Image (spheres, helix red, strand yellow):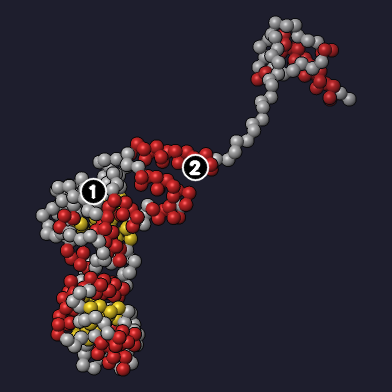
Amino acid sequence: MARTAAVALTLLTGAELRDNAERVAAAVRVRTTPGPAVLTRKAWLGAAAVVLDEDAARRCRRDGMPRRDGIILLTAGEPEPSVWQAAVAVGAQHICVLPGQEPDFVRHLSEAAEAARGAERNGWVVAVTPARGGAGASVFAAALGQTGTEALLVDLDPWGGGIDLLLGGESVPGLRWPDLSLQGGRLAWSAVRDALPNLRGVSVLSGARRSHEPGAGPVEAVLDAGRRGGAAVICDVPRRMTDPEIAALKRENAILRAAERFPKAAPLYRKLLEVEDTEDQIALMESWFAQTQQAASPAPTATPEPEEPSAPVDPNSPPPTLNGGVLPTPAGGVFTDAKYAAAYIEQEQAAWETRNRG
């Protein structure tokens, strides 16, 4: 879903300074509009950023423009004390020298544009990794990306041959990992989104047919751009993790954040990141679960000793007489001797008569 381009209000007198500012703004997909002859509070407050020079800063201060975020003061040379005074008076947060400090200007302008879109830190990042080869993690990651209104699918498997193949978009124009020549830094989500192929409604940063492993710096920059832009960022992570994959896990919200919510599991997560072999990972998890269950199990209670069964009656022994005492009921209530059964019945009959006599 395309977003409306952010607008920067430019109040610059010098043609060279204005041209440099417009060139940088175009690179980060920010539209510039010159300030009107009579500046209004609505135009001043409605822009994503205000880019001005020393003279414009003094005029705005004199006209009573309120303080706001996203004010950037540009100068063509080393700032003099008067430039600093004008910046403080108008409430500028940044001073940039053009040419020379284009990277700083890009960063400040991108931050102002993204803050104006209301997308700061609204996105989330999920890492999908398989338990074994062929488990379908890449398919699941691609399907997960199509569940949101705006998503970025990042291929972090250098041995996978490119996740764009899975989506049938290997011939769609756009940048892949080998085409990106950056070491890190801050990127505008709008610029990243427009440079990538859009496959089935998902912006895809895929690997190539040949093995290519991006560095941790570029991975962090791309993930941060997507998250700051409000996108759902889904990373297809291989089982064997290297620096880029670990960088993704540090950024994502589903795995290591769980350790923050469940501190007892934090040691397990840290150990799993250090182990590459699947069998060792499984052994770690089994050991941890066994310890957890043992700690959670209640202490065993002493079980009462079973009562000793009545002494078995010898069926070959003569039945005792009533004068000799009470005949015990045989174990299990089963009579195995007819004479004993007859004597027992006689005993019970006599006891009944005694209880009911008189």
Residue 94 vs residue 181: left or right?
A: right
- Could you tell me which quadrant the C terminus lies in? top right
Q: Quadrant of residue 271?
A: top left
Could you tell me residue 303's position as x and y percent?
Answer: 64, 31
Q: Quadrant of residue 349?
A: top right
| Residue labelled with disc 2 | 292
The structure residue drawn at horizontal position 29% and vertical position 40%, both measured from the top left corner, is 132
Q: Amino acid at mark 2?
A: Thr
> Where 250 falls versus 286 (above or below)?
below
Residue 203 vs residue 348: left or right?
A: left
Q: Indicate the secondary structure of the residue bearing disc 2.
A: helix
| Residue labelled with disc 1 | 157
- Could you tell me which quadrant the N terminus lies in? bottom left
Neighbours of disc 1 within 10 Å: few (<14), some (14-19), many (20+): many
The structure residue drawn at horizontal position 44% and vertical position 47%, both measured from the top left corner, is 267
Q: CA distance from mark 1 to mark 2?
A: 33 Å
The structure residue drawn at horizontal position 23% and vertical position 48%, both measured from the top left corner, is 157
Could you tell me residue 250's position as x and y percent?
Answer: 35, 55
Q: Which mark is residue 230?
A: none
Q: Quadrant of residue 274?
A: top left
Q: Amino acid at mark 1?
A: Asp
> Where 58 falls versus 103 (above or below)?
below
Q: Indicate the secondary structure of the residue bearing disc 1.
A: loop
> Where 94 falls versus 272 (above or below)?
below
State the residue in front, 350 or 116: 116
